[in-house]
Image (cartoon, rainbow, N blue to C red):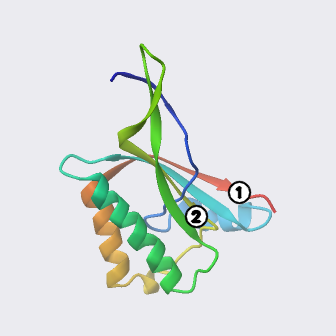
Amino acid sequence: MKSAALIVVVFGSLSLAPSIASAQAAGACPANDMATIRISKIAPGGTMTGFDKAVADHAKWYADHGFDKDRIFAAPMLVADETTHKLAPSPDTMMSFHTHDHEVPKSMEDAAWNAFVAEYRANSVIVSTTHVCLPE
């Protein structure tokens, strides 16, 4: 199947580590509430199963560390067949969101944090990152 375009299916979130944009957006957003949106491709040698585990472990880390509003999830992008124009889930491109994204102090980055970051790195490559302010 040839793909002509990527189309967003679901909005999810993902943040591998606090970034300069994350630190700056805290004061830039009117409600002081931000989402980080990433498009990632499965890396050579990586798997969708490994990426999904990284997302689950990432969400668990935030929940286990008292970040009750943060939501982290991902969904496959859709690709359109050039001939039939039918949409199908991409086998290797995901969109992830981290809503209500909080900056995590370096001192909180523990073994579980390092483990989910390593899972992401082993299984995916970030294509793009976008930060947006969530409405009040």
* Nearer to me, 16 or 62: 62
Position of 72 with respect to 24 (left or right) is left
Near mark 2 (Cα within 10 A), the count class, few <14, some 14-19 or many ≥20, is many
Total residue callouts: 2
Query: Mark 1 belongs to which amino acid?
Result: Cys
Q: Which residue is mark 1?
A: 133
Position of 66 with respect to 57 (left or right) is right
- Residue at x 18% of width, y 50% of height: 45
Which residue ends up furthest to the top in the rendered image? 83
Q: Secondary structure at mark 2?
A: helix
Query: Mark 2 belongs to which amino acid?
Result: Ser
- Residue at x 48% of width, y 55% of height: 74
* Vertical arrangement, residue 12 with respect to residue 9, above or below: below
Where in the figure is residue 65, as x and y percent of width and height?
51, 86
* Nearer to me, 43 or 9: 9
* Nearer to me, 97 or 87: 87
Q: Which residue is mark 2?
A: 22
Near mark 1 (Cα within 10 A), the count class, few <14, some 14-19 or many ≥20, is some
Q: Nearer the viewer, mark 2 or mark 1?
A: 1
Where in the figure is residue 107, as x and y percent of width and height?
44, 86
Where in the figure is residue 38, as x and y percent of width and height?
49, 51
Q: Earlier in the sequence, mark 2 or mark 1?
A: 2
Choose top left, top right, bottom left or bottom right for residue 115. bottom left
Quadrant of the rendering where the N terminus is positioned = top left
- Residue at x 39% of width, y 38% of height: 90
Position of 62 with respect to 102 (left or right) is left
Q: Secondary structure at mark 1?
A: strand
| Distance from the alpha carbon under mark 2 to that under mark 1 | 11 Å
- Residue at x 64% of width, y 68% of height: 100
* Vertical arrangement, residue 120 with respect to residue 61, above or below: above
Quadrant of the rendering where the C terminus is positioned = bottom right
